[in-house]
Amino acid sequence: MPRIETPEAPTVSTVHSSLHRTGAGAVAVLTIDNPPVNAMSMAVRIDLLAAVWDAADNAQVQALVLIGAGGKFIPGADIREFGKPQGAGPVISGREVIAALESCPKPVIAALGVHALGGGLEIALGCHFRVATSDCKLGLPEVSIGLLPGAGGTQRLPRLVGPARALELITSGKPMTAADAQDSGVVDELVDGPLLEGALAFAQRVLTKARPLQRVSERNQRLAGTDAALFTEFRAKHAKKWRGQIAPQRIVDCIEAACTKPFAEAYAFELAAFDECKASAQRAALIHAFQAEREAARIPGLSADVQPQPIRSAAVIGAGTMGGGIAMCFANAGLPVWLLDANPESLARGRALIEKNYATSVARGSLSQAQVDRALALITGTLEYAAIGDADIVVEAAFEDLVVKKHVFQQLDAVMKPSAVLATNTSTLDIDKIANATARPAQVIGAHFFSPANVMKLLEVVRGAATSPQVIVTTMALAKTIGKTAVLSGNADGFIGNRILAVYGRECDFLLEEGATPWQVDRALQGFGFPMGLYLMRDMAGLDVGWRIRQYREQFRDKALRYSPIADRLCERGRFGQKTGAGYYRYTGRDGSPDADVERLIEEVSREMKITRRAVSDDEIVSRVLSAMANEGLKIVGEGIALREGDIDAAYVHGYGFPRHQGGPMYWAAQQGWDIIHDTVTRLHAAQGALWAPAPRLAALAEQDRQTRALIPA
Ligand code: T1G
C-alpha cells in the first residue's frame, strides 16, 4: 500500500494504535484523540490514514476497531480549519481515509460513543460495521453550517435508511438516537457496557463467523425504484423555508443523484456540490454563527474558580403563556419544576395550555408521547410559596409591572434557600430595582426568555449591579442544560435585543412614511431571509401591548426627535393585528392581505410630516434597516451592555428570526465593510439628525476597512 510522505513526523499523534488479543485473533484499536471533541482536523486525517494502512499491512492484525478518546467519536471535520490557508504539510481528505477503510481487506468496526456527526458519521459509514453506545447521537449536521456531507454522507446514508428518511435527516441536520440508528440499519449492535469491550467482542464474533465485509457504497437495494416525485415534492414542501439557502437544495440534488446515477458518478457530483457550498458566503456566515453562539457562553474577567452551582430543580412564578413555556423548558431537560400562581383558575388554565402545547408537539412528531408524559410528570402546580423554597432556581414570569415583581421577589426572599438563584423574566424593567426588593441582590439576575419560551433558543441573561459572578455562570450554564443559547447583557433599557429591535422598527416605520408600504418592507426583509417581515410579526404579536407601553412612555419621549405615529393611528382605529382581523394587513384567518385603508392612513401621515413620498427600493430597505441595527449594536458594545459583536449576532439569530445564513447584523455589516455602513450612517445623520448619530467606534472601523479595501486590486 502507498505511504504518506510526511516531511516532519507530527510531534503529537492524534491517533494511537494498540493491539488487543481476542479469542479469534488480534484487533488493532485506533483511538482518535483530538481534544476537546475529537474533531477531524488535517492532523487527524493524516494520522488516521497512516494508522489504517499500518494495521492493514500488519500481518498480526485480523481486524480494526476505530474509537474516540474519552468515549466520544468524531463530531465531523474541524471547522476551525475552514477558510484558513492550508499549511505546507501533506493534504489528506476525509474521502481518502474512507476509501482506505472501505477497501481494507480486514473487517473495520467503528465504535461510536457520545457523537458520530458529519465527517465522523461518514467515516463510520466507510467502515464495514458499526457498534454504538445507547446515548450516542448520529447525524449529518453539515447543513447547519452551510455545507453538505462531502465525504459520501449523501450517498451512503440513503443506502442504509432509504432516500426518503435520508432527505429528512440530512436537510434538517437533526441527529438520530442510537436506538433509531439501529432500527434503521445504520448501527449493527448497541453496546451496553464499556464501548471498547463491546466493540472487541463484536470484532471477535465477526472474525469467528467470518462475516462478509460489505461496503455500504455497494448496497443499492434501498435506492432501486425510487420515485422521482419524492424529490419534486420534497423540494416544493420546503421551498419557502429554504429560500436563498444553498446547502439544503444541493443536499436534495445529491440524494437524487444517489438514486439515479452509479455510485462513482454520484460521489463526484456530491464533491462538486460540496465545493460550491464550501466556497459560499453562507458557509462562512453560518460558521461565524456557530462560533459566536459558543463564544457568547464565555465571560471574560471571571476567575476560573467561579464554577456553576448544580441546578437540580426549578420553580416558575406565574402560570401564563410565558411561565408555562419556561416550565416546559425545565421539564424537557428532565428537571422537576414547580409552577406557582396566586390564582387556582390561572394555574389550571396554565396547566391546560402546557398540555395543549405538548399535544401539538406530539402531533407534529417533534416529541413522543412517552417524552411528553415524562415532562408533564415533572411539572407540579402550586399556590404556595412555601412549597418552592428548596428549588435551586426560580424564574419569575409575573405581570410586567415593577410593583407586582417587587412583591413577588419579597416573597421569594422570605422562602427561598440562601443559594437559590432568583431570576426575573422581565423584558423592560430595571433588574436592580427588582433585586433591591430583596435582602440578597447578589442572587438576583435577569433571565429573559423569548416567546414561545419552549421554542425560541435565545436566553438573554441580564446582570444587575450586584449580581454575583457565581449566579451569572450558573444561569449561563443552566441555559445550556435547557438547550438555550445564552447571551449576557448589561442592565440597560431594552437590554441588547429589544434596544436594537426599537431601531429596526423605527427605520421600517420611517420608510413607510417616505414611500414604502408594509407589504413591501416585509417582502424585502423576507427576501433577505427573515422568516417573517416586521409588520406581519407585529400583527401576529398584537399591536395593543406596544401601544400601551408607548402611551406610558410618551411623557419621557424627546419631542425633538422624529417619531412615526403610524402604529398609534392603527391602534386608535381598533386595528390590533391578527386578533382583531386587521392591523397593518387585513386578515381572513391567519393570512394577511394588503389593505388600501392602511395605505391611505400612511399617506396621510406622510402629508402631515411634509414628506414627499418617493419610490423606495427593496435594497434600500434592507441596507437602511441593517445599517441602523449595526450602528446601534456598536453603541451597545461600546457602552459595555454587550460583551462583543458576536453576542448581538447570536441574540438576533436565536431571538429575533435574523437569518442564520446571513450571520447576524454585526457580521452582515462587517461583510459589507464598515466604511459602507459609515457612509450610510453619516448620510442619514446629516439628513435625519440625532437618531442616526454614529457609534463612537464607527469611524475607526470604517477607516480600517477603507485601508483594507485600498489594498485589494481592482
Ligand atoms: N470542529 C472544531 N471544533 C469543534 C467542533 C468541530 N467540528 N465541534 C465542536 N467544536 C468545539 C466547539 O467550538 C467548542 O469549543 C467545543 O468543541 C465544545 O463544543 C466532510 C465537512 C460536537 C455535538 O457541525 O454539533 O464534517 O467553544 O460547546 O454541547 O462532511 O459542538 O469550547 O472552544 O458545542 O458538547 C460537521 C458541530 C462538520 C458538528 C458537542 N459537524 N459540533 O456539543 O459542546 S463539517 C458539526 C456540534 C464536516 C464533512 C464535513 C457540537 C458537539 P470551545 P460545544 P457540546
Image (cartoon, rainbow, N blue to C red):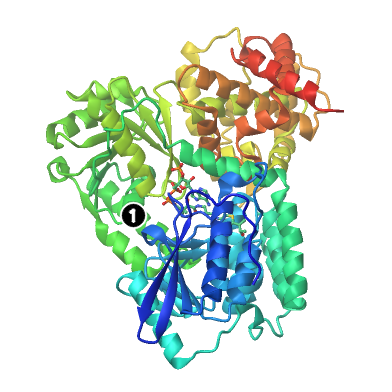
- The residue lying toward the viewer, choosing from 88 and 85, is 88
Beta carbon of the mark 1 residue lies under 8 A of ligand 1: no
Residue type of the residue flagged with mark 1: Ala
Which residue occupies the foreground of this view, 70 or 351? 70
Viewer-side residue, 392 vs 643: 643
Left or right of 291 in this view: 239: right
- In terms of image quadrants, where is residue 331? bottom left
Image x and y of residue 484, in percent: 42, 45
Q: Position of residue 111 (x, y in %)?
A: 43, 70
User: Compared with residue 428, is residue 354 higher up or lower down, i.e. above or below?
Assistant: below
Rendered image quadrant of residue 218:
bottom right
Mark 1 Cα within 10 Å, few/some/many (few <14, many 20+)?
A: some
Instruction: Report the side of 444 relative to 387 (left or right).
Output: right
Q: Residue furthest top?
A: 560
Q: Which residue is mark 1?
A: 333
The image quarter containing residue 127 is bottom right
For image coordinates 53% across by 31% down, the residue present is 648
Quick one: quadrant of the N terminus? bottom right
Q: Left or right of 452: which side holds 9? A: right
Residue 274 in sight from this viewpoint = yes
